[in-house]
Amino acid sequence: MVTVALSAVAQREVNYDESKVPQYVLPDVLTCQDGTAVRTKKQWEKKRRPELLRTLFSQEYGFTSEGKVKVQYELLQEDRQALDGTATQQQVMITFSGKGKSVKALMLVFVPNQRKGRVPVFIGYNFRGNHSMLPNEEILYSPYFQRMKNRKDPVLTRNNQASRWPLKYIISRGYALVTMCYQDIFPDNKDGGPESITALLPETDDAQSRWQALGAWAWGSSRIADWVVKQPWANKKQLIVMGHSRQGKASLWAGAQDKRFKVVISNDSGCGGAALSKRCFGETVAIITNAFPHWFCKNFSQYAGREEALPFDQHELLALVAPRYLYVASAEQDDWADQKGEFLSARYASAVYSLYGLEGITTDQMPGLHQPIMNHVGYHIRAGKHDVTQYDWQCYMDFCDKAFNR
Ligand code: GTR
C-alpha cells in the first residue's frame, strides 16, 4: 500500500484491488453530446472530434493560448562526430518572447550520420536536463538548471538519467532525436507559472479553464516540431512525439492537438494520461490534482472523488490521435499508473480507428509481458518498474518502422 500526502477529500487508501474498481460507465467515444451516433469519418472530424477537444480544453488541460510569441532558434554548438562518430549533435537555444518577457529553452539534437534521405524524428522531453543524458562536458545545462545557484547540487551530475535514452541505439536504427528539458517550458512546481511560457501569452478570461503545465508542455513540443520540419535532414511527415509519465500525459495532449505528430507514444503515463480515470485504480483525480495543482486547469479538480461525474474519460483523449498511429506502454510494477486502465483506454479509443477501417486493439484481453500488439494502435506491458527502458525504445522503433514502412 502506498500513502501519499493528501487533502481531506482524497484521504483514503489508494485502491490496488481489481475487485474494488467501481462499476463505471464510460462515455461512448462515437456518440455525440446531443446523442447523435457517429457513423462516418466526416461526422467524427466535423462534429465529435472538435466537441471532445473542446471538453478536454475546458475540463482537463485548459485552453491552449492561440496568441503568438516571438520564437527564435539559435545554433550554439555542433559536433559532427558525436556518439562515436555515428551522429551529428546540435545544441539549439530557443528564445520565446512576449509581454516584455522572455523564456529560454535548450534543444539537444542527434541526427544519424548514416542516412539515405530524410529521417524520422523523435521529439521528447527529458526530466533532468540535457546534461543528464550523456557524460560529455560540452553539453550545456538546460536553462532551468543554469539558474540553479548551488553548482554542487547532485541534480547537476552529468549522465544521471542516461539509461532512459539509449542514444546510440536510437541512432543505429536510423532515427533522429530532439530533446529538451520540460522544466524549461514550465518549471514543474506550483509557482512555476510566472516563469513559464504561459506568462508570455495572452490569458483566457475564464481562470477555471486556463492552461497550466501540461498544456504548456504540449505547446512546447509543437514549437520543437516547428523547428524540426525546417531541417534538411528531417522527414516532416515522420514526426513522433514520445513522453514518459507526466511527459506521457503531455505527449498525448500534444498529439491530440497537433496533427503533424504521426506517431504518438505514451510511456507509463497513468492518471491524466492514458489511464481511465473512472476506474479509480492507483492514482486518482483527487490525488493528482492535490499533489500537482499546477498541471491541469482548475476545472479538473471538481472531479476529485467524483470520477463518475466526469463527462469524458481518457480513451477520448487517445481517440483524438486517430487515424494517426498511437502507442501506449505500461510496466508490470507500475500499479500507480493503472496498467489495465491504460490498456482499456487504448482498446476503447480503437472504435475511432475502426471508423477509418484501421485495426486498433481489438481484444479486451491484456497481452502478456513482452508481447506487444502492433496494429494501428500499439500496446505493450513489460517487466519492471515505472521507467523507460531499452525494451520500450525497441518496441517504439519497431512500431514506427511499421508505421513508416521502413
Ligand atoms: C508521479 C505522479 C504521476 C506521474 C509521475 C511521473 O508522482 O503521481 O502521475 O506523472 O509522477 O511523472 O514520474
Image (cartoon, grey):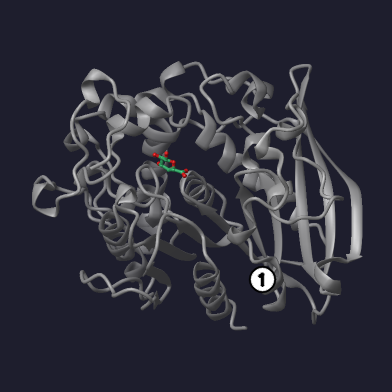
Residue 20: percent from left, percent from top: 10, 47
State the residue at coordinates (11%, 45%): 22
Q: Residue 169's image quarter? A: bottom right
In this orientation, which residue lies closer to the viewer: 11 or 46? Answer: 11
Q: Quadrant of the C terminus?
A: bottom right
Residue 283: percent from left, percent from top: 30, 41
In this orientation, which residue lies closer to the viewer: 153 or 120? Answer: 153
Q: Is residue 232 left or right of residue 337?
A: right
Residue 20 makes an appearance in the image: yes
Residue 354: percent from left, percent from top: 32, 70
In this orientation, which residue lies closer to the viewer: 145 or 353? Answer: 145
State the residue at coordinates (27%, 43%): 277
State the residue at coordinates (40%, 76%): 375
Residue 289: percent from left, percent from top: 36, 29
Q: Residue 383's image quarter? A: bottom left
Q: Is residue 341 left or right of residue 371?
A: left
Q: Is residue 71 above or below residue 396?
A: above
Q: Secondary structure at mark 1?
A: helix
Q: Is residue 291 above or below residue 82?
A: above
Q: Which amino acid type is shown beneath numbered disc 1?
A: Ile
> Where does label 1 land, which residue?
170
In this orientation, which residue lies closer to the viewer: 212 or 99? Answer: 212
